[in-house]
Image: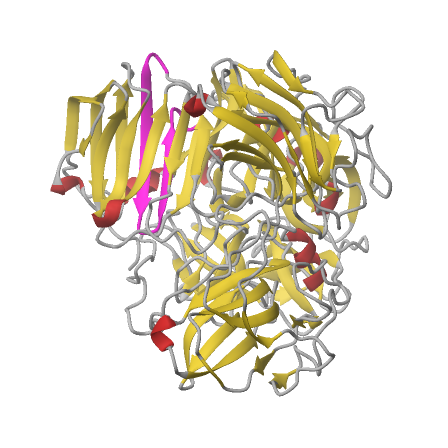
Amino acid sequence: MSSGRASRQARIRMMAAVATVCALSAAPLAPQAVAGDTPPYTETYRPQFHFTPEKNWMNDPNGLVYYKGEYHLFYQYNPNGSSWGDMSWGHAVSTDLVHWKELPLALSHDDEEMVFSGSAVVDRDNTTGFGTRKNPPMVAIYTGLDKDTGIQAQSLAYSTDRGRTWTKYQGNPVIDIGSKEFRDPKVQWYEPTKSWLMTVSLSTEHKVRFYSSKNLKDWDLLSEFGPAGATGGVWECPDLFPLAVDGDKDNIKWVLVVNINPGGIAGGSAAQYFLGDFDGKKFTAEDKGTYTPPTGTVMQDFENTDFGAWTTTGTAFGAGPAAGAVAGQGTVDGFDGKGLANSFHGGDATTGILTSPEFTVDSRYLNFKVGGGRHPHESGTLLEGDPPAGTVLADFEGGSYGDWTTTGQAFGSAPATGTLPDQQEVSGFRGGGLVNSYLNGDSATGTLTSPEFTLDKDHVNFLVGGGNHPTGSDHPTAVELLVDGQVVRSTTGKDGEALNWASWNVKDLAGKKARIRIVDDNTGGWGHINVDHIMLSDAEAQPVSQETSVNLVVDGQVVRSATGANSEALDWASFDLRPYAGKKARIQIVDLNTAGWGHILADRFTAADAPARSAVQRADWADYGKDYYAAVSWENAPGGKRYMIGWMNNWDYSGAIPTSPWRGTQSIPREMALRTIDGRIRLTGKPVGSLESLRQSGPPTASGVTVESTTQPLIGPAAQGKALDIEATFSLEDAERFGLKVRTGAGGEETVIGYDTTTQELYVDRTRSGAVDFNSTFPGVQTAPLKAENGKVKLRILVDWSSVEVFGGSGEAVITDQIFPDPAAQGVQVFAENGSVRLDRARVWHLDSAHD
């Protein structure tokens, strides 16, 4: 996010109530690499042509401005570690947007404030008085977070030496509306009114505000825009800029970029945009009309007084359909007709399952409306079940820690009895007590250590939740098993307050003496841990479902699933039934969550030949991948170019990606344009042209190759590598899917970049791209709509040591994904499925490193 990883309270609210299954380390921990063991910029996953800081945490790009031959890239940075915290502005400069020089810290956090996201301008007329007309100041406009109050307000800092040193303005803040959700100012000079224009987010209200100023210090409110488009998460890092349509300078449209987290097109963080007009005061988005879903056969519309042949368990769904909201619930809307399935009967604390009768799959799609809580189905979880029998080492009942010992302040003098002040609701613990290190918020640290015990059973089972900061990271929040004083097993939370079962297999440690140590050494967002019911058992405890979801069950397995968006408004969703044609299936509406947003809403199940599209799918996206967020553009770029860059990460798992000693990467800068494609104006992007300076000469080339229902090397060893720039053009024949596989290697590793002719979609499949198990939301397939042009599909693929960026067509379909493959996985293959495709031409350039 941006500035939004704000106060402890704000961060807890923003990082979603999703109760994900905890990551386990069932094998002994591998030795951690020590910084300095490897020369900088040669580490296993270190990008070679994307900007990363030498060390520590980085997120949003900030302060993008061009001045005196330099592109400035400021960015959210933690100077004190590789997890989010102590937000400051890092700084790098480039003459070509490819070769970057990291400079000293620009704007530092201090005892009073953290320096969140914002922008920078060159005050050429010295309207601020911070410099002179001869030496105009560079002015940063940033969100300052008041550490005491949590208030977010807009502030200034200035530099008169090309951004090398900075002074914070003594009159800060310059805009303060008393809000804890007001951030990420993007400022530009608006020539028609000879004034400064600020675009800034009211994040939880899903609004963007526009302000005007003559001197950057005194601001007048012009207007607001929103809510609109996708609103499933906070709105952050807005950007407003004009572009010519198809290069016609007499046809100008304005683009408003609004980044959203969560609720993006691929899940989690993403960059959406609106097209429209700006008249100097107000942005007006183009009217896209009302949406009508495909027609079909209604299977269940919940219009009767009972559920008919559908069966229920539990009490959450009541005796029949609801007529809207039920007792204690906010306004429910977006359902069709008079009734819907609503599991809020008795509040969030109740659970239950509503199941359809069995039916034969004889349609292509199942469309339905869904709302309520965002608690996705997790594969491998049980719908119900108690832990295996065993010896309880600690259940944290009775009001004391007994003979466990504490250090620091985080754990207090006794177990917690549940949720602590300012904390999101804690659930999933047993009995009346648990370990909860949020005692004084995320700022407190400490340890809690058990007395010594003997490992006389095969498994250590326990409940865990809280922050995702693994052992081995700079500031862990973890449960650790110590043998001979060494950490031999470790588990962390997954940035959710709900506890769930975790298990260590300790057969190889049988008979050894051990201790449990619970560690909270983190003062940033999600800097706490929840633990309960630690026990020795002969069997492994299985995590229990905490989902609020609509599932399609085939052969007893959940094969499709959808969840709500933490909203009482229902929206369309769709399941692709084509792989299950002729099979028997059931629909299950599941509420197994008892915490905040622990309910599900559903309506209008319809069998149809085409998929319904949700508001998220109908929104416009600058990128359809999982890893493109906080996208903003440079001001003052030469030649009137509009270059945009995004943080190549996702808040769903940003703190868990397996990189060290840095964490966080920026995308390749992209040149943006508006093009008319298939009758509609689209925002398009292509890699900055200077990237081609890294291309090695004599690229391996393939042409005129027909591939039929097989996978084969694209060219051969000459085309293999970890840092590649690939251009490929395919002519459609009868293959259902085709494309390229990159970073292929032993063990079946591959990242699949394909085109699906049946859905007319570009896709990236990273389910087998190497390390994918550090977060349940990481593996998956991302898709982007892309129509073939004159029977051809053109791809531009950038492969770096830990990412792929795929540009389809004219740049209207872009998918950016991180990958973490084995360094030895360097193969490139071409494939076709269920038919043939013609590869007209492919060229593979090896790219030199951009590091000096």
Residue at 67% in and 37% down: 231
- 78 sits left or right of 18 in the view: left
Can you see residue 130? no
- Magenta residue span: 789-812
Q: Please check the rendered image and state whether residue 333 is part of the magenta-colored stretch, yes or no.
A: no
Q: Please check the rendered image and state whether residue 799 is part of the magenta-colored stretch, yes or no.
A: yes
* Magenta region, main secondary structure: strand
- Give the quarter of the image for residue 780: top left
- 644 sits left or right of 99 in the view: right
Which quadrant holds the C terminus?
A: bottom left
In the depicted view, which residue is nearer to us: 246 or 684? Answer: 684
- Give the quarter of the image for residue 324: top right
Reply above or below: 471 against 2: below
In the depicted view, which residue is nearer to us: 392 or 746? Answer: 392
In percent of width and height, residue 118 lies at 61, 52
- 503 sits left or right of 602 in the view: left
- Give the quarter of the image for residue 374: top right
Reply above or below: 791 against 490: above
Residue at 39% in and 83% down: 512
In percent of width and height, residue 798 lies at 32, 40
Can you see residue 615? yes
